[in-house]
Image: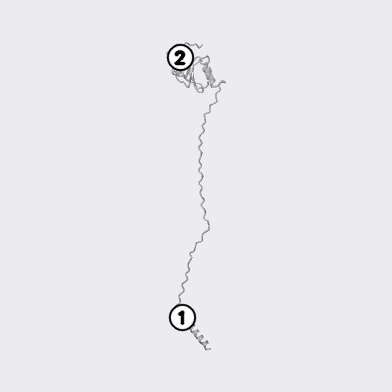
Amino acid sequence: MEKRLVLILIFSFVVIGCTTQISEVEEIPEEPEIIEETPEVEEESFETEPIAEETVPEPEIVEEVQEPEVVEPTKPEPKIINGKTLEKRLEIAYDNLHEAGSSKQILDDFPDVELVYTDDPDASIKRMFPPEILPFHYYYSEEADKTFNLCGVGRSVFICDGKLDREISKEDIDSGRCEILPLYLSDPRLGGSGDFDYDFN
């Protein structure tokens, strides 16, 4: 019994002593709780921005330059006059040079002829010609591109290429431009002697 009391006392001393020591220990202030503020994160907007449409350049239109077609001038249809082509009418005119009625044949077969010159020689030359055959008339046909010389008795005297609206010259004959009856080469204006021997009856 005594032993139990002794133990209780010893135990009480020990407990009291521990309590005193604990109270003497300085109280350690509690560290303040650090609350880290998390920055507010803006919520991402899930609204999709309109996507800019990609501008596709329009293809460049290159116009093809077409070379102009070479159009050859169409030849006019040959005129048929008095049932004859131009070639046939000219053939007759040359074949009938200075024949009776040759003037009429030319005027009929070339209705487009126009008087472009009249050769009425002066007195010194005129006296060498029979008065009946004067003057000489130069008629030009644009269709044939020929000049026909017709005398006063209804006969053709010469035919020249192109329009001859002046007095015929020796050069016109020598160059081959004009086809003339040899009889008329006696004309002194063409270098002839002036000796004419006409037979037009």
Q: Nearer the viewer, residue 112 or 26?
A: 26
Q: Which mark is residue 130?
A: none
Percent position of residue 201, x then y: 51, 11
Percent position of residue 191, x then y: 43, 14
What amino acid is labelled 2 in the image?
Leu
What amino acid is labelled 1 in the image?
Gln
Residue for point 46% across, 80% down: 21
Q: Which badge, 1 or 2, is on the more N-terminal residue?
A: 1
Q: Is residue 126 above or below residue 16?
A: above
Q: Nearer the viewer, residue 200 or 4?
A: 4
- Residue tagged by mark 1? 21
Percent position of residue 121, x then y: 44, 15
Q: Secondary structure at mark 2?
A: helix
Percent position of residue 138, x then y: 48, 19
Residue for point 45% across, 14% down: 185
Residue for point 48% across, 83% down: 14
To which quarter of the image does residue 195 belong?
top left
Q: Residues within 10 Å of mark 2 (few under 14, many from 20)?
A: some
Q: Secondary structure at mark 1?
A: helix
- Residue tagged by mark 2? 185
Q: Nearer the viewer, residue 18 or 191?
A: 18
Q: Residues within 10 Å of mark 1 (few under 14, many from 20)?
A: few
Please identify the residue farthest to the front as the structure is shown.
3
Please identify the residue farthest to the right as the structure is shown.
83
Query: How many angstroms separate mark 1 from mark 2 (CA)?
Result: 175 Å
Q: Nearer the viewer, mark 1 or mark 2?
A: 1
